[in-house]
Image (cartoon, helix red, strand yellow):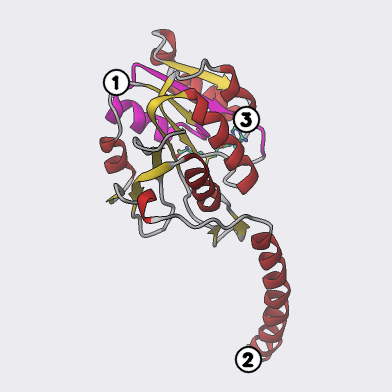
Amino acid sequence: MSLLKNIAKPAYRALNGLMEKVRKQQSGAIPQIELEPKHIANLRIVLDRDAFLEALPKGGVVAEAGVDHGDFSARILKITQPRKLHLIDVWHSKRYHGGLQGFVRERFADEITNGRVQIDLGLSTSVLPRYPDHYFDWIYIDTDHGYRVTADELSIARTKVKPGGIIAGHDYITSNWDGGVRYGVVEAVHEFCVRHGWELILLTHETDRHLSFAIRAIPSVAR
Ligand SMILES: C[S@@+](CC[C@H](N)C(=O)[O-])C[C@H]1O[C@@H](n2cnc3c(N)ncnc32)[C@H](O)[C@@H]1O
């Protein structure tokens, strides 16, 4: 046992040293833009995603990009009572497979029949441009979490929300520790806020740090 421990320790250190270089390279490829005080002047922290939804507008036109089994979609429906909820997903990976679309269709069959829920299949960056400009009260993004895709989603979403509308999303973190995956949501959100004069208005505060964020245009900033 102790022999295994002694062999494993140097191997772990060597592998970790190698991975540190890879991680630094990945981080170095992502722009790091710092916020200014005006970008958090109206920021409110809430405990979790239910409280987050309580703070978002009710009865609106809403999209959730990245649906999985529809667990959060169900919370959106219950808490924010949207008059229309678009569910955008590509469901094309091993984990998030095509069968989930059928599951979600069955789960929200009544709402789909009465037109309150619509499933829009495809990549977020292909589906989002198809909506009319200024259509949504808010959009919640929970898809790929990488810097490039998130930056593109934010850029498209900006033209799709109403003036004063909100862009929100999940995994406002720099990495998934357990999965060893570099995320780029924080950097993409900060770059977007600085470039377009938007502010953070809501953050969740879960112990697992899978935070949700909400941003909106700073009312006084001329764009
Ligand atoms: C983390 S899950 C979403 C979880 C869900 N929002 C919830 O809280 O219950 C991510 C989902 O995003 C989808 N996805 C990943 N990349 C995508 C992309 N570029 N466009 C559309 N959907 C994507 C996956 O198929 C998966 O269902």
> In which image quadrant can residue 2 be found?
bottom right
Identify the secondary structure beneath mark 3: helix
Q: Which label's residue is closer to the chain start, 3 or 2? A: 2
Residue drawn at 56 percent across, 20 percent down:
120
Q: Name the kind of residue labelled 2 in the image.
A: Ser
On whether residue 120 falls in the magenta region, the answer is no
In this picture, residue 111 sits left or right of residue 29: left
Report the quarter where the N terminus lies: bottom right
Q: Which residue is mark 3?
A: 125
| Residue at left offset 26%, top offset 37% | 55
Q: What residue is disc 2 on?
A: 2
> For the point 42% across and 34% down, which residue is it?
222
Can residue 68 be found in the magenta stretch? Answer: yes
Which type of secondary structure does the marked residue at label 2 adopt?
Answer: helix
Total numbered circles: 3
- State which region is magenta: 65-93
Judge: label 3 CB < 8 Å from ligand 1: yes
User: CB under 8 Å between callouts 3 and 2?
Assistant: no
Structural crowding at the residue carrying mark 3, measured as other residues with C-alpha within 10 Å and reported as few (<14), some (14–19) or many (≥20)? some
Task: Please tell me whether mark 2 or mark 1 is closer to you in this view.
Answer: 1
Q: Secondary structure at mark 1?
A: loop
Three-letter amino acid code at the position of disc 1: Gly
Q: Is 11 displayed left or right of 169 in the figure?
A: right
Q: CA distance from mark 3 to mark 2?
A: 52 Å
- Residue 173 bears which disc, if any? none
Query: Measured from the top left, where is residue 97 in percent x and y?
Result: 63, 34
Dot 3 or dot 1, earlier in sequence: 1
Image spot of residue 25 (x, y percent): 71, 64
- Please report whichever mark, 2 or 1, sits nearer to the chain's N-terminal start: 2
* 123 and 138: which is toward the camera: 138
> How many residues crowd mark 1 within 10 Å: few (<14), some (14–19), many (20+)?
some
Mark 1 lies on residue? 59
